[in-house]
Image (spheres, rainbow, N blue to C red):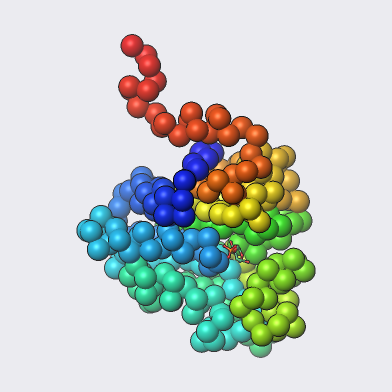
Amino acid sequence: MRVLIGSSAEHVARIAADNVLAGLAHHGHGKNPVLGVATGSSPLGLYRELRVAVAEGRADFSNAQGFALDEYIGIPDTHELSYRQTLITEVCNTFGLPVSGLHTPRGMADSVEEIEAAAHAYDQAIKASGGVQVQILGIGSNGHVGFNEPGSALRSRTRIKRLAAQTRIDNARFFDGIEHVPTHCVTQGLGTVLEAGRLVLVATGEAKAEAVALAVEGPLSASCPGSVLQLHQDAVVVLDEAAAAGLKKRAYYDDAAEGISLENLRVH
Ligand SMILES: N[C@@H]1[C@@H](O)[C@H](O)[C@@H](COP(=O)(O)O)O[C@@H]1O
């Protein structure tokens, strides 16, 4: 795992965008990007940086596919608070990933079985695309990734999940009161997320410091779903100072952030 700490919101966004683009070049050879996209405030600066990269000719998402991490159950995907509409605004309309290439889990159906079948088909669609090359992630204040709440199986697949009380409180700001926040969602499983070529997790602000410390330095545990990043071969965690405040091995991360080159290996 690489832990990179930016000095400002803009710096965090730039570091994250650079790591997304490098990840696409490495895991996807730059052609037909398959990007895992997340809602939430954490990746918004990163999305704006991807727009800059497109404008400067350093990136092209016009043939890309995007797979969302999650969707609320019970909100039509045409509703402005659905994650589909949120991602159309924040991803498609920002850096040009085509709406026709945006996949979101199905959160509305006539039966639970239909939602479960669609969740299974979602995992198959990810596989059929060749797999997510770079997965963008945020982290909830309770350590959730996607909507994999504490207690989620570390090898879980896309499925229906009950939202934690804390998550509903955190997300109530988007709704007219907590009673309107859905109680359930469909989320990619932690096992699904782990299959992406690279994971880029962005977290900012002191409210994330405890979750980040547990995810990065705590034990691998379903109690902190973010700790599953410790199992991944190419995970990058991009933080601001506030979100990094609970880390004990900060000096090491700063040293390692120099990267690996013949020069800094100091073999001569
Ligand atoms: N399902 C989403 C997550 O994908 C997101 O990472 C998290 C953090 O959101 P924010 O970045 O706004 O703090 O909350 C939501 O519940």
Q: Is residue 210 visible?
A: yes
Q: Residue 27 location, x and y as percent?
A: 39, 48
Number of marks drawn: 0
Q: Is residue 117 visible?
A: no
Residue located farthest toward the left when viewing the structure as drawn: 57
Q: Is residue 106 left or right of residue 223?
A: left
Q: Is residue 204 left or right of residue 62?
A: right
Quadrant containing ligand 1: bottom right
Identify the residue at horizontal 68%, vertical 76% (top origin).
172
Q: Residue 136 location, x and y as percent?
A: 49, 57
Give above or below for 83 relative to 126: below
Q: Is residue 120 left or right of residue 90?
A: right
Q: Residue 262 location, x and y as percent?
A: 33, 22
Give above or below for 41 relative to 252: below
Q: Residue 246 location, x and y as percent?
A: 66, 42
Q: Quadrant of the N terminus?
A: top right
Identify the residue at horizontal 46%, vertical 55% (top origin).
9
Give above or below for 251 relative to 191: above
Give above or below for 142 relative to 167: above
Report the front residue among 123 and 174: 174
Residue 60, image quadrant? bottom left
Residue 138, image quadrant? bottom right
Q: Is residue 223 left or right of residue 233?
A: right
Q: Quadrant of the C terminus?
A: top left
Residue located farthest toward the top when viewing the structure as drawn: 268
Identify the residue at horizontal 60%, vertical 62% (top origin).
146
